[in-house]
Amino acid sequence: MAARLAEPAPRPLPPGQFHGRAFVRFGLGRFKSRKLPAAPPLQVRLRGDVAAEVEVGAQIATLPEVEQISDFHCVTTWSRLGVRWTGVRFADFYHTIAIPMAEPDPQARLVVFHGLDGYRCAMSLDDLLASDDVLLATALDGAPLGVEHGAPLRLIAPAHYGYKNVKHVVGIEFLKSRRGYRFPLPYPSLMDHPRGRVALEERARFLPNWLIRPIYKLFVPKAVRKS
Ligand SMILES: Nc1nc2c(c(=O)[nH]1)N[C@H]1C(S)=C(S)[C@@H](COP(=O)(O)O)O[C@H]1N2
Ligand SMILES: [Mo]
């Protein structure tokens, strides 16, 4: 059995974030109200600009399992520090499963994660591969992911805002161009920054953070708010 990970040294909160009181299920509006099965099967369709569209599932469990403690930052300004995830590295998944099985076009640098609830969000492949803390997570705090936090598989990209960390992943789409992608309605695409890096406060496109922060704060769930 793997030794319990030591809590990393305390890190400062990124700009504009506060320490939330609880780690709650945070679905975006209509996606949160979608009823999902309690234990959805692990089945991920690899598609888009690929040589072969394939469904993968059991293969994911053959990759080396990693455990990490990382911070989670929602764009609405709450953060949860020191969350313990178990899963596989996205880079291992990409090199060992996606490339040999689906053969994404080498120019497909945009990766869209699709959730079972209809939510989707895109990240750049370079960002996904740049750091080994990007996981496809299957467990939280040592227990299999529950439906509230993304069963059966979710993306964890700690350097990126929570909205990039798609839950209930059922599809991974590799695209050569952004034209094939749209942030899901009713949300305007300007809420979806192309990179979404927390350290640089890339919350949204075009809008200044002094304007976005107070608006987003209105969406912080009561259980998470400061006292
Ligand atoms: N499938 C799916 N993934 C999603 C969302 C969603 O509504 N549906 N919400 C995103 C947002 S805005 C945040 S902050 C995190 C919240 O993760 P949690 O519900 O585990 O707290 O999930 C992200 N991934
Ligand atoms: Mo969020």
Image (cartoon, rainbow, N blue to C red):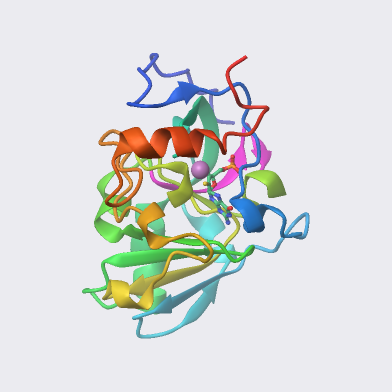
Q: Left or right of 94: which side holds 87?
A: right
Can residue 84 be seen by looking at this rendering?
yes
Please tell me which residue is depicted at 41% across the width and 59% down the height of the picture.
Answer: 93
Q: Nearer the viewer, residue 15 or 88?
A: 15
The secondary structure that dominates the magenta segment is strand
| Residue located 34% across and 81% down the image | 49
For the C terminus, which image quadrant?
A: top right
Residue 137 within the segment the image draws in magenta:
yes
In the image, which residues are magenta? 134-145
Q: Quadrant of residue 2?
A: top right
Q: Position of residue 135 (x, y in %)?
A: 44, 47
Q: Is residue 22 left or right of residue 34?
A: left
Q: Residue at x 63, y 26 (%)?
A: 22
- The image shows residue 208 at horizontal and vertical percentages of 28, 41
Place of residue 10 in the rendered image (x, y in percent of width and height, measured from the top left): 40, 14
Q: Position of residue 185 (x, y in %)?
A: 52, 66
Can you say whether 121 is above or below 85 in the image? below
Q: Does residue 59 lie above or below 46 as drawn?
A: above
Q: Is residue 139 above or below residue 103?
A: above
125 part of magenta stretch: no
Q: Which is more toward the observer, 112 or 207?
A: 207
Residue 146 seen in the current view: no
- Identity of the residue drawn at 61% across and 27% down: 224
Q: Nearer the viewer, residue 59 or 161?
A: 161
Check the image and name the residue furthest to the left: 107
10 up-or-down from 187: above or below: above
Quadrant location of residue 48?
Answer: bottom left
